Amino acid sequence: MRLGDVCTKISSGATPKGGKEAYKPFGIPLIRSQNVLDWSFTGNGLAFIDEVQAAALANVEVEPHDILLNITGDSVARACMVPGWCTPARVNQHVFIVRPGSDLDPTFLLCFLQSSKPLLLKLASSGATRNALTKGMIEDLEVELPDIETQRAIASLIGQIQQKIILNQQINDYLAA
């Protein structure tokens, strides 16, 4: 099944008029590629825009459980789930919002994109001077989709593993300090 057939949104954003100089010290988060890591999101370097700028980018509003996918540059194919504390937010043109439909568990989708990273990197480097993924490339990805209960069981296991990784990182940070 095509990923585009089981997602309700696959779309990149834009940078507000004026670029970096238009960012605000606080306001509505603008997610950039530097915020999207493999499996995790970082608030380090998060940019902010005001209500007027956000309204102009209303078509790329991020919702809880959306998957973010970097589509250009050296960080191409990194993917994570947007954390709830960061919504509502917008994305810039280097990040796709991949929103799963009702038959697709968000964590299962993230797992699928992470396991497809070698293919995504190959697609991104084909024929371009700069690594880039297109909307069509992502929409046309073939995904084997088990029933939703199986997806949720897989997602639960992945979630437990991710929590253990986070806990181990916190322990390591504590021990290093």
Image (cartoon, grey):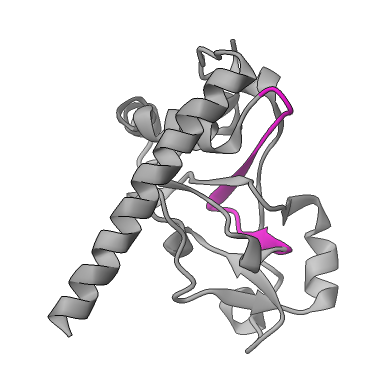
Image point (53%, 32%), residue name: 109
Q: Quadrant of the N terminus?
A: top right
Image point (72%, 29%), residue name: 101
Q: Nearer the viewer, residue 174 or 27?
A: 174
Residue 97, picture quadrant: top right
Range shown magenta: 88-103
Image point (45%, 66%), residue name: 42
In the figure, is residue 125 to the left or right of 174? Answer: right
Q: Quadrant of the C terminus?
A: bottom left
Q: Is residue 24 visible?
A: yes
In the figure, is residue 81 to the left or right of 79? Answer: right
Q: Residue furthest bottom?
A: 25
Q: Nearer the viewer, residue 54 or 152?
A: 152
Image point (41%, 38%), residue name: 158
For residue 65, above or below residue 102: below
Residue 148 at x, y percent in the picture: 63, 20
Q: Is residue 18 visible?
A: no
In the figure, is residue 70 to the left or right of 54? Answer: left
Q: Nearer the viewer, residue 131 or 41?
A: 41
For residue 85, above or below residue 38: below
Residue 140 at x, y percent in the picture: 56, 18
Residue 166 at x, y percent in the picture: 34, 59
Q: Nearer the viewer, residue 151 or 2?
A: 151
Total numbered labels placed on residues in the image: 0
Residue 147 at x, y percent in the picture: 61, 14
Q: Is residue 105 magenta?
A: no
